[in-house]
């Protein structure tokens, strides 16, 4: 009987883990604030900065996962005040980055060969941009709460929850590292740099639109 229960528990774990990976893969691939920031930091800065930004996103996911597993996500989702605080901080940050992008003049191929002529981000700034963008998005709170509600139960062991959480963090870091690597390959980056000013305009417009959408979000909608 114990062997059967262990086998059933392992089967449930594998099935739920596969569901988690599938759903989270779709979420990561869907365009959003994280993706826009990843594109902008990677193209205008460097592969290193793009990868550090990816780890900033992952750190934000780690925070989301931790409080979701602790049950605090329900409190945040049901508290209009807490939800709105997160919402407006996140929207404000997206507005700030979006306006900065709209005001940017981009930089030419000649300037890109001399990286000292372009405003450079430090590692801390890159990490912080990824971390803040992800952390102050209450949509992430609702997403993880909905996801974990489907695959977690009070009976599952702690290690299972930890594995699920680590999976989300690792997938985030891996996905955006791949994005940064692809975007900074010489051929791809050269093409993007030819229209860097317009990329800034598009990224800025998208970030402001996302900020407006976030500002109008309601706790009851994911």
Image: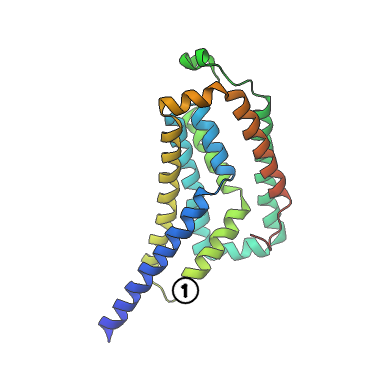
Q: Answer with left or right where residue 175 lies relative to residue 67.
A: left
Check the image and report above or below for 212 versus 185.
below
Disc 1 crowd rating (10 Å Cα; few below 14, some 14-19, many 20+) is: few
- Quarter assignment of residue 36: top right
- Quarter assignment of residue 14: bottom left
Check the image and report above or below for 90 versus 201.
below
Colouring style: rainbow
Q: Is residue 120 visible?
A: no
Which residue appears farthest toward the bottom when viewing the image?
Answer: 1
Residue 22 locus on image (x, y percent) = 44, 59
Numbered disc total: 1
Residue 114 locus on image (x, y percent) = 47, 13
Q: Residue at x 49, y 31 (%)?
A: 42
Q: Residue at x 67, y 56 (%)?
A: 83
Q: Residue at x 46, y 47 (%)?
A: 58
Residue 76 locus on image (x, y percent) = 63, 60
Q: Quadrant of the N terminus?
A: bottom left
Residue 129 locus on image (x, y percent) = 55, 37
Which residue appears farthest toward the left when viewing the image?
Answer: 3
Q: Element type at marker 1?
A: loop
Q: Is residue 117 visible?
A: yes
Q: Quadrant of the C terminus?
A: bottom right
Q: Which residue bears the numbered disc 1?
A: 153
């Amino acid at each position: 009987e114990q062997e059967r229960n262990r086998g059933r528990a392992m089967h449930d774990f594998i099935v739920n883990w596969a569901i988690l990976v599938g759903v989270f893969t779709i979420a990561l691939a869907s365009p959003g604030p994280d993706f826009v920031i990843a594109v902008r930091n990677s193209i205008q800065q460097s592969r290193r900065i793009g990868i550090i930004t990816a780890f900033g996103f992952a750190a934000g996911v780690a925070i989301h996962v931790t409080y979701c597993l602790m049950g605090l996500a329900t409190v945040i989702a049901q508290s209009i005040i807490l939800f709105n605080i997160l919402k407006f901080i996140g929207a404000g940050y997206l507005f700030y980055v979006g306006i900065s992008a709209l005001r940017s003049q981009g930089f030419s191929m000649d300037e890109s060969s001399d990286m000292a002529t372009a405003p450079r981000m430090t590692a801390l700034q890159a990490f912080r941009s990824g971390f803040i963008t992800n952390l102050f998005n209450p949509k992430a709170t609702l997403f993880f709460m909905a996801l974990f509600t489907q695959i977690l139960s009070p009976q599952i062991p702690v290690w299972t929850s930890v594995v699920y959480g680590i999976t989300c963090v690792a997938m985030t870091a891996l996905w955006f590292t791949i994005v940064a690597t692809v975007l900074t390959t010489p051929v791809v980056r050269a093409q993007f740099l030819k229209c860097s000013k317009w990329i800034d305009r598009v990224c800025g417009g998208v970030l402001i639109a996302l900020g407006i959408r976030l500002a109008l979000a309601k706790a009851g909608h994911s």
